[in-house]
Amino acid sequence: MAKRVVPEADRRRRRPTKQGAVLTERLIVETALRMLHEHGRAGLTARRLGTALGADPSTLYRYFRGMDELTLAIGDELIGRALRSWEPCGDWLADLRDVGTRIYRAYLAHPEAAVLTANRVSGRANEIAGDEAIIGVLRSTGLPDAEVVRVYQAFVDQALAFAALDAASLALPQAARADDEAVWRSTYAKLPADTHPHIAATAPLLVARMNDSAYPTALDMLLRSAAAAVAAARATAADD
């Protein structure tokens, strides 16, 4: 059964932890992020987190109903870090490119956390503020709301999907990642043209490109599609 969460005003410990810190939700999330970076997803447990904080693991339930709620808070923290200093410049394409790149980079900075949280929807403050900002940028173009939501979904899902995909590679042991990256040169580049003519024809390009993220290219393609939709909507409005 989920444990009762203590109201916000009553959560703060009266005494510091063994490390001399007063527990807060933010300190717990930041410590969890550090543990994910150092020990991976399997290393993040209530017991280990309590030890890292110098507190009894049961104390964590004064802040979170369980580890799943902490996971949602971690994802919300990543979004908050992505948009903490973001300010719209007024060019909607530039603003969307900046937001997408910021989200992707914030998740990639914490690969284990990205794999754990990129597919989650928290409904927490940073996530809501980010969604409000993105939808606001799209609505400023004059797109109909149905089209705004269509582009918004593709935009957010694309950034998070690439973040999760690329983070999963970064989270691999170094030797495994190196082996994967070598396959393009050791296998694909050596396929004969008589059996695999298309791969053979493009092999040098594949070797040069396939170990880099496709997110910048995919983001460009999505934004070009969005720009075409905006142009069509504005042309329709001008004719009415």
Image (tube, grey):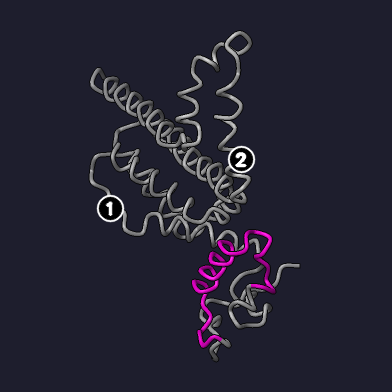
Q: Earlier in the sequence, mark 1 or mark 2?
A: 1
Crowdedness near tag 2: few (<14), some (14–19) or many (≥20) residues, C-alpha within 10 Å = few
Relative vertical location of residue 140 with respect to residue 131 in this rendering, above or below: above
Quarter occupied by the C terminus: top left
Relative side of 5 to 205, left or right: right
Question: Which amino acid does the dot numbered 1 rest on?
Answer: Glu
Mark 2, secondary structure of its residue: helix
Q: In this view, does 86 lie to the left or right of 204?
A: left
Say which mark, if any, is on residue 179.
Answer: 2
Instruction: Estimate the x, y position of residue 213 in percent, counting from the top left.
Output: 47, 37
According to the picture, the residue beneath numbered tag 1 turns out to be 87
Magenta highlight on residue 39: yes
Mark 2: which amino acid? Asp
Left or right: where 169 falls relative to 46: left
In terms of depth relative to the viewer, which is nearer, 102 or 210?
Answer: 210
Secondary structure beneath label 1: loop
Judged from this view, the residue extending furthest toward the bottom is 15
Over which residues does the magenta segment extend? 19-48
Asked if residue 181 lies in the magenta stretch, the reply is no
